[in-house]
Image (spheres, rainbow, N blue to C red):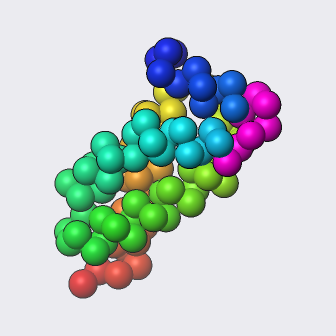
Amino acid sequence: MDDQEQPIRDAVRQRDLGGAATTALKLYGSELFGYALWLARTERHAEIGYWDAEERVRGELEYFEWTVSVRAWGHSVVRESVRTFEAKHPS
């Protein structure tokens, strides 16, 4: 695992889920938003997909199993969020 993620892991262990999510998003948020922009058909779709992904990270980090990096998981969450939004809003 990436040493950069140790503060996230520590915060989760201490049940500081808000702090863990904030740390994760500070660390990877701009990269993940750039990924959303690359995936989405429009900038607006990217924004909405990223916002949804951010909420999912905040809500699901407590259940994260640490078998992959938070960074890789974040990319998966963004990809799924953008694709789900665009499937529901095709135009």
Q: In the depicted view, which residue is nearer to us: 91 or 10?
A: 10
Where 72 sits versus 53, above or below?
above
Left or right relative to 35: residue 17: right
Q: Residue at x 43, y 36 (%)?
A: 27
Residue lying furthest right in this view?
15
Query: Was residue 13 drawn as part of the magenta stretch in this picture?
Result: yes
Residue 75's spot in the image, x, y percent? 39, 43
Residue 87 makes an appearance in the image: yes
Query: Was residue 76 drawn as part of the magenta stretch in this picture?
Result: no
Residue 45's spot in the image, x, y percent? 30, 71
Residue 12's spot in the image, x, y percent? 71, 33
Placement of the C terminus among the 4 image quadrants: bottom left
Q: Residue at x 50, y 15 (%)?
A: 3
Q: Residue at x 76, y 28 (%)?
A: 13
Q: Residue at x 51, y 33 (%)?
A: 70
Report which quarter residue 62 is drawn in: top right
Where 27 sits versus 40, above or below?
above
Q: In the depicted view, which residue is nearer to us: 75 or 14?
A: 14
Report which quarter residue 76 is drawn in: top left
Left or right relative to 23: residue 36: left
Q: How many marks?
A: 0
Q: In the depicted view, which residue is nearer to us: 14 or 58?
A: 14
Residue 76 makes an appearance in the image: no
Residue 77's spot in the image, x, y percent? 47, 50
First to last magenta residue range: 12-18
